[in-house]
Image: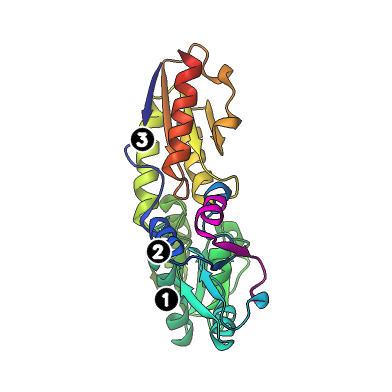
Amino acid sequence: MIIKLAENYGFCFGVKRAIKIAEENKNSSTYGPLIHNSKEINRLEKDFEVGLTEDYKTFKAGDKAIVRTHGIQKNELADLKKDGIDVIDATCPYVTKPQQICQDMSEDGYDVVIFGDEAHPEIKGVKSYATHGARVVTTVDELESMKFKDKIALVAQTTRKVEEYMEIANYLIPRHKEVRVFNTICNATFENQEAVKQISKKADVMIIIGGKNSSNTKQLFSISHDNCPNSYHIEDENDIDYSWFKDKVFCGISAGASTPDWIIQNVVNFIEKGVK
Ligand code: F3S
């Protein structure tokens, strides 16, 4: 069986940056998981004494608090800064951008619409920047019952599918006088998505590696599954069942933006061992 990695996969710029920041700040704590990968978080704790705090109110003056890649809510950031805590911001610049857009557009009198998952930390953070509130939607159906002013600003969660974002924009544009559409989907997402689309068209079996909570990994899995029904979302090699590879000729591999290279390599080694 041929095993091949997608042309682009794994860690993106924002995650590499956040991990570097964490490694440079020993004895600190991240507020919420730095990235969506528990194994990498354990490594940072073991090798760099970077802890994890779920409640930002437990930080005390003098503590070092790292803000995770997906960002936090505006009021939480303000509280942290106020309390004499050393705040180290590892928010990805591609997340800071929609936060800023929401704030500016909201203050300029636009109704802000966010295409994304309301329960996702990134979107909770982004929404908090819309001074006069924002509506979060995932489908056109949800928009049908909503009333808007004439001016709408539209942003998307960084990891969303561009085709679905366009459906939202296409619905809003003919119905309102002014719709400002901001492309806040990040390049890393485009590149990994395009690469998984290409390889999954050729593969007999696809392995997508990433945290079960990782939204961009779920997106990669969904694209892969559309082209290759034998697609599997795994966290690491322990989730693999060798029967998946029986009579298969070409195995494609991709990984979410928070999946470290050492996990990907373990998966490749494990598959190679079992199919020989
Ligand atoms: Fe940032 Fe995009 Fe990665 S938003 S954290 S570079 S997937």
Whole-percent x, y for residue 2 in the image: 37, 19
Amino acid type, label 3: Ala
Residue drawn at (51%, 79%), measured in percent from left and top? 86
- Camera-side residue: 61 or 39? 61
Amino acid type, label 1: Ile
Whole-percent x, y for residue 208 in the image: 49, 36
Task: Please give the residue where the numbered disc 2 appears in the rendered image.
Answer: 184
Task: Please give the residue where the numbered disc 3 appears in the rendered image.
Answer: 6
Task: Please give the residue where the numbered disc 1 appears in the rendered image.
Answer: 101
Query: Local crowd at mark 2 within 10 Å, few (<14), some, or many (≥20)?
Result: some
Query: Local crowd at mark 1 within 10 Å, few (<14), some, or many (≥20)?
Result: many
- Camera-side residue: 105 or 252? 252
Q: Closer to the camera: disc 2 or disc 3?
A: 3
Q: Closer to the camera: disc 3 or disc 1?
A: 3
Amino acid type, label 2: Thr
Q: Find out whether residue 48 is within the magenta segment.
A: yes
Contact (Cβ within 8 Å) of mark 1 with mark 2: yes
Q: Start and end of the magenta stretch?
A: 42-56
Which residue appears farthest toward the left when viewing the image?
7
Real-space Cα separation, disc 2 to disc 3, in angstroms? 24 Å
Real-space Cα separation, disc 1 to disc 2, in angstroms? 10 Å
